Image (cartoon, grey):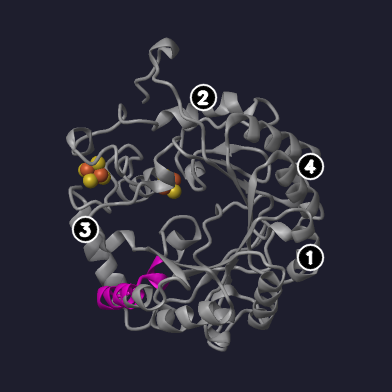
Amino acid sequence: MNAVSDAVARPPLPAPIGLLAELTHRCPLRCPYCSNPLELDRRSAELDTATWQRVLTQAAALGVLHVHLSGGEPTARQDIVEITRTCAELGLYSNLITSGVAGALGKLDALSEAGLDHVQLSVQAAEAGNAERIGGLKDAQPQKFAFAERVTALGLPLTLNAVIHRGNIAEVPALIDLAVRLGAKRLEVAHTQYYGWAYVNRAALMPAKPDVDRSIRTVEEARERLKGQLVIDLVVPDYYAKYPKACAGGWGRRLMNVTPTGKVLPCHAAETIPGLEFWHVQDHALAEIWADSPAFRAYRGTEWMQEPCRSCDRREKDWGGCRCQALALAGDAAATDPACSLSPLHGKVQALAVAESALETAPDYQYRTIGGAPRVATPEGAPA
Ligand code: SF4
Ligand code: FES
């Protein structure tokens, strides 16, 4: 699959900028668009503290600048403070990606003292009932607000992350107001990417095109109005886009993703692609994995591309879009991402999005669980 076979002929490989440390798949929330794999890693198989510290040390030596402490819910780990302190000691910028519920607030002061640099808090909606139905956890919203208040009181920069879909797209204006009220410096209005659990729940999540267009206009207007106060990042939905995004900044170009059990992936959904060989931090140093792991080399650069990507002048801008989405929609991870208007499958994908978003009643959400059957929302709201 990869035409690069001669190490001597390879161009110099830039270092990855970011490391996504998926410390655990355990999470008190069960968002129906979760990007974690359908098979979640169990606690007993998670890497221990010393191994994470070794991985972080190797990451710093490799040239990584940012570490995203993620999950699942990273504060579910007993050693989250120690891991954060290691980042600070190594000069790695640490970003805690958290739901802000369960035990997160109780650990926040210690995390700040250990040198945490930034907090990214997820919000499922602005309205509490809706947020708690989407996240599958009752009483989550007041916990999130108390958490956000403490983040800003500690002087930590706060980003709110809202994944947008049919169930909350009408709340984009309210989410912007919420970000201002909570003192966030940045808001991510991120339309759902359809892989992982979001692919399972696609028909329940797909928004209608007019609603998507309205949400984009709302963001553009708010950016003007809130200049200097709030930065708003907008991730537009792939299925309605003209060109795809450079997923993960291009395969094997900017990011490494370490799973709770130590497998190193080029993107968080890479395990959905059959036949890829992933290396583990227990067996190889991070630098070796970055340079030589078969999974990282499989779709790095442009040699693997088919038409129309192969001769397209955008091929080094978006790197052919998303490999995992190409597999899910075209059945071939090396195909042009069907989100691209130049893909022969683009029309079918758009028609599918229109058909799903036109369903009069959205199907119930399938909730993620570790080692159990998916949980389904009740008409009353979050599952108990
Ligand atoms: Fe990007 Fe490929 Fe589409 Fe060109 S054809 S815009 S490289 S996805
Ligand atoms: Fe895997 Fe996009 S999620 S390449």
> Mark on residue 109?
1
Disc 3/disc 4 C-alpha distance (Å)? 45 Å
Looking at the picture, how far across and down is residue 376, in whole percent? 56, 74
How far is disc 2 from disc 1 in space, using C-alphas?
Answer: 38 Å
Q: Can residue 373 be seen in this view?
A: no
Q: Kindly identify the amino acid type of the residue bearing the numbered disc 4.
A: Asp
Residue at image coords 28%, 33%? 305
- Judging by the rendered image, the residue that carries numbered circle 4 is 48
Residue at image point 32% right, 83% down: 360
User: Which element type, helix, strand or loop, lies under badge 3?
Assistant: helix
Magenta residues (range)? 202-220
Q: Identify the residue shown where x is 52% and y is 40%.
A: 17
Res. 30 in view: yes
Residue 262: which quarter of the image? Answer: top right
N-term mark: 2 or 1: 1
Which amino acid type corresponds to the residue marked 2 in the rendered image? Ala
Q: Which amino acid does label 1 sit on?
A: Asp
Front in this rendered view, residue 235 or 23:
235
Disc 3 and disc 2 in contact, CB within 8 angstroms = no
The picture places residue 371, in percent across and down from the top left corner, at: 67, 57
**Residue hosting label 2:** 291
Residue 224: % across, % down: 34, 74
Label 4 or label 1, whichever comes before in sequence order: 4
Spatial CA distance of label 1 from label 3 is 50 Å
Q: Which of marks 1 and 3 is in front?
A: 1
Image: 232 above or below 322: below
Ligand 2 under 8 Å from disc 1 Cβ: no
The answer to the question of whether label 4 and label 1 lie on touching residues, with beta carbons closer than 8 A, is no
Of marks 1 and 3, which one's residue comes earlier in the chain?
1
Q: Is mark 2 within 8 Å of ligand 2?
A: no
